[in-house]
Image: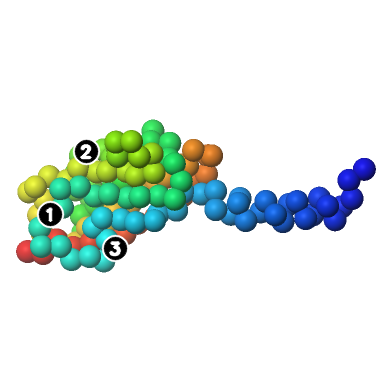
Amino acid sequence: MIKPTLIAAAVLAIAPQWAWAHAHLKSATPADKAVVAAAPATVTASFSEGLEPAFSSLTLLDAAGKPAVSAKAAPAPGDDKTLVLPVPKDLPAGAYTVKWQALSKDGHKTDGAWTFTVKP
């Protein structure tokens, strides 16, 4: 029979891994709160875990909260931790919000947002 203290020790040893099993945003381009001189060619989000691309997304919203692009984000070639959203060259100056949703390969869902501004 396994002693309760051994079970508790095993759970505590594994628990930190469970806490980090979610896909957390590691980096974003343009960066959060960045002010850029011109529209970026792409919006990119890199995560801490591999993603399920069919259930992960980036949405670029204008200052009114309306979608600013019709394209869909796709995984970066050969990188299941990064999503790339193409942005048209004629994206107008203004404030933008990037909303993201990520489903990691282990089934955990996370979401968030960041902002950037394109100078006039």
- Tell me the amino acid under the disc marked 3: Asp
Which disc, if any, is residue 32? 3
- In the rendered structure, the answer to whether residue 80 lies left or right of residue 39 reads right
Going from the N terminus, do you reach mark 1 or mark 2 first? 1
Q: Which three-letter amino acid code belongs to the residue tagged 1?
A: Ala
Q: Nearer the viewer, residue 46 or 120?
A: 46
User: Which residue matches tag 1?
Assistant: 39
Find residue 69 and report its image quarter. Answer: top left
The local secondary structure at tag 3 comes to loop
Q: Name the side, left or right, on which 4 lies relative to 107.
A: right
Residue 95 shown left or right of residue 37 in the figure? right
The numbered mark at residue 84 is none
Q: Which residue is mark 2?
A: 71
**Label 1 crowd (10 A; few <14 / some 14-19 / many >=20):** some
Q: Position of residue 98 (x, y in %)?
A: 29, 53
Residue 91, image x, y percentages: 11, 51
